[in-house]
Amino acid sequence: MIQDFLSRPLVFYASLAVLVLATLGLLVMAPAVALLPVLGVVGGWWLCQQKIRTLALAIFAAAVTVDLVTEVPYEGHWQSPLYFPGLLLFTKPGMSLPLIDVATVGLLGLNAYRRAMGITIDGPPTPPLPKPLVLGLLAVPTTILWLQVWGIYINGGNSVVAKWQWHQMLSLTLLVALFNVALRGPEDFRTLGRIVVVGCCTKAFLGAFFILTIARPRGLYHEYATTHSDTVLYVTGLVTVVASWMEQPIRKNFWRMIWVCAVIFMGMHYNDRRLAYVSFTFSLIAIYAVSPWHWVKRYATRAGLFVAPLFPFYLAVGWSNPTGIFGIVGVFKSLVEGENLQKGQMDYRDIENLDVVYTWEQNPIMGTGWGHPFLEKIKLPDISHAFADYLYHPHNSVLGMLAYGGIIGFSGLWAWVSVTMFLAVRAYHRAHEPEARAGGLVAMSVIVAYTNQCFGDMGTISWLGTVLAAMAATCAGKLATVTNAWPAPQRLRNEVSASEKSASPAGNLV
């Protein structure tokens, strides 16, 4: 054990001498960072004393709360108190990889070491993920590797740009592996829900503060408040409280749903992303479709049937005057027609989608591989001054995967999404506890929102969507195993059961 090794007098004094010399050297050459060796040793030792579950949940909480600096929050006009933590987590200051990647790989390595050495600080093994989900997730790195070979080494693509075409997709599989180690099952859903709601409220208040006290008073143009990817977070928060009330309709859950929804809708309003309303609507439709006929669904159906005759008139009036109470029609109209149609022009996104589809048509089975731009059948406005690699990252990530991977590559990169949705719905119908059932609905809705984000706004290269989708896949898999919606192999079930019975106090720590 490391404790035994470090407790040897010679090793201990040698290590102490190295630490002192390093500190003294930095004190002379760079006094501002002289304490880094000491802080690093203390911090590393403290981390090794913690449970993987605690550290993994801390990473998740940080990821959904701090500023997503890679997407230029507040359009670069303001740095919130959460900007620096976001800079550390999502960028790579002084490192070759972002800190979130380093932390994920480090914790997976720490878990492997503890299991190999028999250290039981983390308790018994958690329920395994269903085999179809594991296979779907393993297909992602396999497909990424193939498209790297096909695109770079065979077709001569740009290897530097290629890395950022697939980076977050690979990170998603590692995050699922980490969350699988950390999460025990439905008993952790309440903690996850609280983390998401706190993250939503934090982003909503910061976004409102920016718009009301900084942007508007200074006359600054603002396309969004926080970031585009907060759409997925807001939808997750809304569905969390709505599903909790639906599955356990008590007064406490109702009033919590009301005030949380009010705060999140405020954040969505100031963030001004149409996709947020579309994703939330689709999530509600999905929940309506899979949920049983309890009283909430019956009342919702009756209300819908009552207003249905009035809807065509509401739509007709709002189509020509999409303001005020008809603003929702305006959002729908802009999605259907595009914002520039009345000027006789195609939207940028429409042209881009046509170009990406054209690229796919050139090689529909194999695709171009990574490292290639999509072809401009119709010339796009040059936005390289703001986004140098815009031809490598179409806004529609789904069409992008088809263009770069063809049908084969797309299937390998996207199979886990279908499997996750299947497991979430199947497990929901077999769960009995309200929290477990609500968790199944939330996992399903996250996949709906993530899919919409991929289709509408570069979701596959978004850190926030990646983290939330990874957690949703893990929760759906755990719930499916616990509820026997997809039975785990008997060997694994026996291993978990035996570990739970023989669990003992933690042994030597790292």
Image: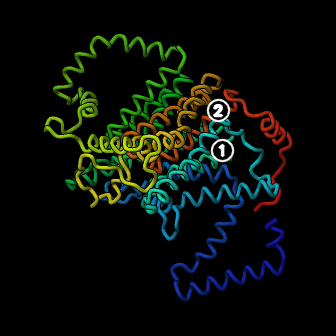
Q: Is residue 442 above or below residue 64?
A: above
CA–CA distance between discs 2 and 1?
A: 11 Å
Q: Is residue 17 above or below residue 113?
A: below
Image coordinates of residue 163 in percent, x first then y, are 48, 58
| Side of 463 where 127 appears, left or right | right
Amino acid, disc 1: Asn
| Side of 399 where 190 appears, left or right | right
Q: Which mark is residue 180?
A: 1
| Side of 280 where 128 appears, left or right | right
Chosen colour scheme: rainbow
Amino acid, disc 2: Leu
Q: Quadrant of the C terminus?
A: bottom right
Image coordinates of residue 327 in percent, x first then y, are 24, 30
Q: Secondary structure at mark 2?
A: helix
Image coordinates of residue 304 in percent, x first then y, are 37, 15
Tell me the residue that label 2 is attached to.
479
Residue 160 figure quarter: bottom left
| Side of 217 where 483 appears, left or right | right
Q: Which mark is residue 7?
A: none
Image coordinates of residue 420 in percent, x first then y, are 57, 34
